[in-house]
Every structure is written in structure tokens, then in C-alpha cells.
Image (cartoon, helix red, strand yellow):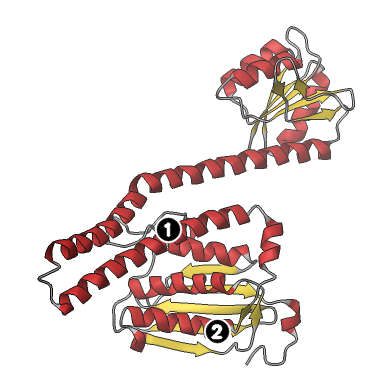
Amino acid sequence: MAKILIIEDAEYLAQGIARILQLEGHEALIATTGREGIQLALTHKPDVILCDVTLPEVDGLGVLQIVRRSEELASVPFIFLTARAGAPLTHPELGIQADEYLTKPVTAQTLLTVVQRHLERVSSQAEYKQRLSELEQSLTYALPHEFRTALNGILGAATHLAVFADKLTPEELRELSEDIRVSARRLLRLTENFLLYARTDFLASAPELVEQLRQFTTEEPSIILQDVALMKGEECGRTPDLRCTLTALNLRLAMPSEHFSKIAEELLDNALKFSPAGTPIEIRTWCTEDMFWAEIRDHGPGIPPDLPERIRAYHQPGRLLHEQQGVGLGLILAKRLVELYGGSFSIESPADGGTRVVYGLPLPAEEWTREDSNL
């Protein structure tokens, strides 16, 4: 429900507009003069203002000027009501501008459509500000810690090499070089994930660019998923824990292979990182008529019940309870990439424990009729 201020000197018209809005569940405030409208706006902080251009005491442009000067009201959608088609939205001398105008008489459908559009815009802006706030918190707290940890590993090993270069055995040199390599890879992956997150954030509002990316292809996604699993398993010495059941072979997806591989890498990394060695990591693929599906299941501690509803960038569940590397981007990156290409993503803790991630990606139309698509 939104709070909407109607500033209109024709009381019968103001009451009619109010009834239309109230039937949709909105709260309607009515002022019949410009001065009264300004007072109500400053007192009640409405979500949208509908204002007649010609008003007693203070006209519509005067109301707009006061509203735009108020820090709390400056971004509130301001919609003029006017009897003149093509009425101006701006006051060149004052440098102020309304968001839209409606020509009287206005139909109920037009009124509701315009109001809803501006409410959605405000909601979108609020969500964007929330994401900026989360980003700021990450940059302030998590990111410096992660960069510092990786850089300290590199600097520590490099300093040891510089001080004791003449006394180190070949085995000690190999150990120090491995420490540098691991820390550098961690730093590189962290940087790449932040850059990719920023790119997916941009692509989400640029469908024409996503369409260009769909011109690239991922051949045999089941095999790529298996290869990534073997690589990640070897990195952490858990290759024997992998259980692959691949039943969707010889397929092609309309997306770059590096994005498909990134989804697999992040989800498998989580599964291996947060489950005990010696417990199975189950990987399964299949397809329906128009979707390729993959499931990754581990037998670790599982996830909080409300995690699917509160997945946010830079949020890492249990950060204060468990010592974890990374800043929580892996899960959100995988989810974002899947959804960027029109896919489906779900995560849950099954009744018998662990974590189960299932994601689906749409098959190109020409793949639907392939006889081997379900093999």
C-alpha cells in the first residue's frame, strides 16, 4: 500500500481520484490548495504526489519547487494533473522538473498504470540503494580482510625467501613457492569474482548484450561439469569423493562456456569446502524437453532454512560461526549467471542432511528435437 497525495482544487475530482486509489489499497490524502498540499507533503511524506497545475494560493509549479527543495521529498514522483494536452513538465527559470503529467479527465486505468509505474521505479531505486549499502559494507569490512590475508601470505613467503635465500633447502623453496602460488590464486579469484559480479549487475539491465552473449555456445555441458569437478577434487585431494551420474550428453547451450564453467566451479568449490573429506559429492545431469539440469549434492552441515530467501551479494552465511575464505560471492555469482541466461536456481537442505543445489538452463530450440537429448 502506498501513500498518495492529491492536490486538486476541484474537490469532486479529487474525491473521485481518491476513491480509485483506495479501491487498489492505497492511502489517499487530499488538499484543495497549493499551500495545504505543501503542508501535507512535508508532514506525511507521501510516496507519490498528484498535483493540479492551476491552484489557489500557490500554483502547481510553486508546489513542485518546494517539494524538490526538500531533501526528504526530492525523489518522490511528482505528477501534474492538467487540462492542457502537452503541458510542460519543467520550469526553465527554476531548473525544476515534474516526472510526468496526466491530462484531465483521466481514466481510472491510465491513473493506476502511471502511479504503479512510478511506485515500481521508487521500489527499484530503494533496492539499488540497499545493494549499494551491502557493497559498501563489504568494501569496508570483508574485502580489505580478504585482500590483506592473501597479500600477507605472498609478502610473508617473499620476505622469508629474501632473508634466508642462501640457507633454504630445495624442499623449503618449493614450499614457499607453493604458498605464494596459493595466495596469488586466491587474490586473483577474489578480484575476478568482484569484476564478474559487477558485470552481471550491468548485464541484468542490458538485455541486448545478454542476447549477444547467447550467440556463444557451451558444447557438452555435462562433460564440462565433470571436468571442473575432477579439477576441483584434485585441488583439495577429494577426487575419490566425487560421484558423477551424467545422463544428458551431446548437448549445446546458448551461453559462453566460461560462464557455464564459472557456475560449476563456484558451486563445486562450496560443496567441497563445506563438507567433510570422505563424504560423497554427488553430481547429476539430465534434461527435459527444453532444459538442461544439473544437481550438486554434498553431505556437509547444510544451510540455514531461510537462506534461499535472503541470498544477497557479499553475504556469507555463518561467517561469525565458521572460519571461511572468500566473501560469499560464489553462491550469488552462480545464481546470477544462471538467471542471466533465463535459467532456474534452487538451494535446499534435504531432510537427511547436506546441501542440494539444482539449476537448469534453457536449451536452444534446435536442441529440443534431437533424438540424443535425453541420452
Where does residue 356 sit, x and y in percent of width and height? 45, 74
Q: Which mark is residue 178?
A: none
User: Which residue is drawn at the image coordinates 43% and 81% (left, top)?
Assistant: 229
Q: Out of 81 and 184, give the one closest to the viewer.
A: 184
Where does residue 367 sit, x and y in percent of width and height? 72, 82
Q: Is residue 281 above or below residue 116?
A: below
Q: Which mark is residue 222?
A: 2
- Give the residue type at disc 2: Ser
Q: Residues within 10 Å of mark 1 (few under 14, many from 20)?
A: some
Residue bearing mark 1: 191
Where does residue 30 sit, x and y in percent of width and height? 71, 21
Can residue 307 be seen from the camera position used here?
Answer: no
User: Which residue is drawn at the image coordinates 58% and 74% (left, top)?
Assistant: 257
Q: Is residue 210 above or below residue 234?
A: above
Q: Residue furthest top?
A: 57
User: Which residue is drawn at the image coordinates 24% and 61% (left, top)?
Assistant: 153
- Give the residue type at disc 1: Thr
Query: Which quarter of the figure has residue 32?
Result: top right
Q: Out of 362 and 254, give the one closest to the viewer.
A: 254
| Quarter in which the C terminus is drawn | bottom right
Where does residue 350 sit, x and y in percent of width and height? 43, 74
| Quarter in which the N terminus is drawn | top right
- Label 1: state its secondary structure: helix
